[in-house]
Image: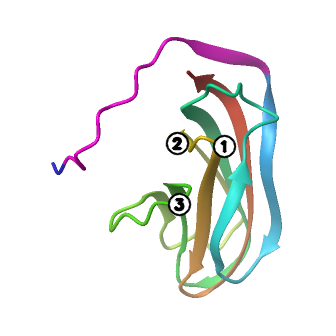
Amino acid sequence: MRILNKKPPVLSKATWLAEGVELLNLANQTSNVTWTDIDCTAATSAAAKFVLMKVQIHTDSYTSGRFLINFRRNGETPSITQGIEHPNVASTVEYIMFQVIMGLDAGNIFEYSTIFTGTCQIDVSLYALAYIE
């Protein structure tokens, strides 16, 4: 494991949100999305360092390939990113969910990108469930 010469943040508390806050709703996606900011200020406090998210992926249609969604802290360019690969998406409608803990920058922002390696149509939703200060 490689450490990036950074001290880990001091964490003081976790706050569970009474209701999930929608951060992203991509409907009927069929093409790649380059790194794009997600602003979490409406779902977190100014002191938040991490957000716990529910990631929902729904397959609308499928012919070939796979779908990937990647996450990274805003402004960073790591060689390895946190993400979810949905390989060999079923030829029938499929729905999957994951939970992801994502680091935030000082402005409560992280980034996502999507990659399609074949022909499929996907819906993606991200919901903030909690945040850590």
Q: Is residue 70 above or below residue 116?
A: above
Q: Nearer the viewer, residue 93 or 36?
A: 36
What residue is shown with label 1? 107
- The x, y position of residue 94, in whole percent, is 67, 59
Residue depicted at 54% across the width and 32% down the height: 49
Q: Is residue 75 magenta?
A: no
2 and 3 marks in contact (CB < 8 Å): no
Other-residue count near label 1 (Cα within 10 Å), few / some / many at <14 / 14–19 / ≥20: some
Residue depicted at 42% across the width and 66% down the height: 77
Other-residue count near label 3 (Cα within 10 Å), few / some / many at <14 / 14–19 / ≥20: few
Q: Is residue 11 left or right of residue 25?
A: left
Query: Which amino acid is tagged 2?
Result: Met
Res. 102 mark: 2
What residue is shown with label 3? 75
Q: Is residue 6 magenta?
A: yes
Q: Is residue 28 above or below residue 56?
A: below
Range of the magenta residues? 3-18
Cα separation, mark 1 vs mark 2, equals 14 Å
Q: Earlier in the sequence, mark 3 or mark 1?
A: 3
Q: Quadrant of residue 127?
A: top right
Query: Which amino acid is tagged 1?
Result: Gly
Q: Is residue 121 left or right of residue 96?
A: right
- The x, y position of residue 99, in whole percent, is 55, 38
Main secondary structure found in the magenta portion: loop
Q: Residue furthest left?
A: 1
Question: Which structural element holds mark 1?
Answer: loop
